[in-house]
Image: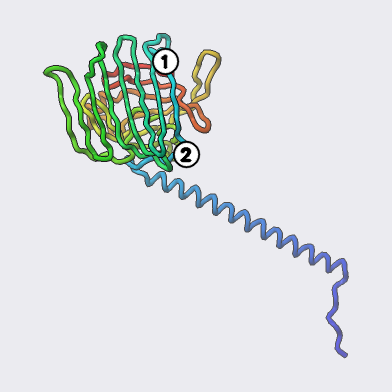
């Protein structure tokens, strides 16, 4: 006589089902956790690799949308006690082209003007611009035009028999930033930095225009005292990425320069402490 397969007792059978279901659920949880960790690891690794592979002349990636902005802010003495001028700023976007003008006007009648034009989208790609410095009589002592697309710098510095003219062909990659574009670089620091540093190419007036690499370095959190209360900010130092001992001219034109950023989406410049221009007059803007 052939016996039919024995069916487990109900309690034992239900126990087997329950244990199997639990093991299956546990396995699924472990697989989901592993998959999530893999995706996260891949994302972080890809972002880190992209930041580390970025060169100074590469355009930065934009984390925030740039649009139309206009306003004024005061220029103060280094201790912040005396107002010595004001900054007039205007930024306008037409399609994917951003134009910005920043004019710093001082009580003595002198002024520093920066004009820039750049393509904005996923990246910030500079087209060109112009830097003009005027003395107390309103006469231009520096007038330099930077054509990034053509790789050409033209203009002059000095007056009378001390005037020097420039017409130089240099390599100017799309990641060449100066003037108003520096604040956009700072705004997008986290997206592009590696190891707490972000490098970019720039043109500085010494008064001779010089194309060099600069870096922004994140320092430490600090508290800014302002009328009405305190502001929590992060200190960023701007400095040449080359050894200043190698080039004494760079050392002379690169005094301590700091931007204090207010965290948020997007971050904002709360204070600037550094030189007005190549002549080294220290100012504070906030």
Q: Quadrant location of residue 196?
A: top left
At a point 86% along the width and 88% down the height, the residue shown is: 2
Q: Quadrant location of residue 76?
A: top left
At a point 26% along the width and 35% down the height, the residue shown is: 147
Counting residues from the start of the chain, the first of labels 1 and 2 encountered is 2
- Quarter of the image for the C terminus: give it: top left
Circle 1/circle 2 CB separation < 8 Å: no
**Residue lying farthest bottom?**
1
Residue 232 location, x and y as percent?
Answer: 52, 24
At a point 44% along the width and 39% down the height, the residue shown is: 62
Query: Which residue is at the front of the view, 268 or 119?
Result: 119
Instruction: Give how far apart the Cα atoms at labels 1 and 2 are.
Output: 28 Å
**Residue lying farthest left?**
161
Residue 185 to residue 223: above or below: below
Binning the other alpha carbons within 10 Å of mark 1 as few (below 14), some (14 to 19) or many (20 upward) gives some
Q: Quadrant location of residue 153?
A: top left
At a point 30% along the width and 17% down the height, the residue shown is: 111
For label 1, the residue is: 74
For label 2, the residue is: 63
């Amino acid at each position: 006589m052939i016996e039919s397969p024995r069916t487990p007792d109900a309690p034992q059978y239900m126990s087997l089902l329950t244990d199997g279901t639990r093991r299956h659920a546990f396995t699924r949880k472990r697989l989901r956790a592993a998959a999530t960790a893999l995706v996260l690891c891949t994302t972080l690794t890809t972002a880190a690799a992209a930041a580390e592979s970025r060169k100074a002349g590469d355009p930065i990636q934009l984390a925030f949308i740039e649009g139309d902005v206009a306003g004024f802010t005061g220029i103060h003495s280094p201790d912040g006690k005396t107002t010595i001028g004001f900054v007039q700023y205007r930024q306008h976007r037409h399609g994917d082209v951003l134009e910005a003008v920043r004019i710093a006007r001082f009580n003595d009648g002198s002024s520093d003007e920066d004009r820039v034009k750049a393509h904005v989208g996923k990246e910030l790609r500079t087209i060109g611009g112009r830097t003009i410095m005027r003395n107390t009589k309103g006469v231009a002592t520096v007038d330099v035009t930077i054509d990034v697309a053509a790789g050409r710098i033209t203009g002059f510095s000095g007056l009378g028999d001390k005037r020097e003219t420039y017409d130089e062909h240099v390599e100017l990659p799309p990641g060449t930033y100066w003037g108003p574009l520096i604040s956009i670089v700072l705004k997008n620091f986290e997206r592009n930095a590696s190891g707490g540093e972000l490098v970019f190419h720039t043109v500085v007036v010494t008064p001779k225009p010089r194309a060099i690499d600069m870096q922004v370095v994140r320092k430490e959190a600090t508290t800014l005292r302002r009328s009405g209360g305190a502001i929590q900010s992060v200190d960023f130092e701007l400095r040449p990425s080359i050894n200043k001992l190698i080039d004494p001219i760079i050392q002379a034109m690169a005094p301590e320069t700091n931007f204090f950023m207010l965290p948020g989406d997007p971050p904002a410049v709360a204070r600037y402490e550094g030189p007005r221009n190549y002549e080294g007059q220290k100012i504070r803007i906030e």
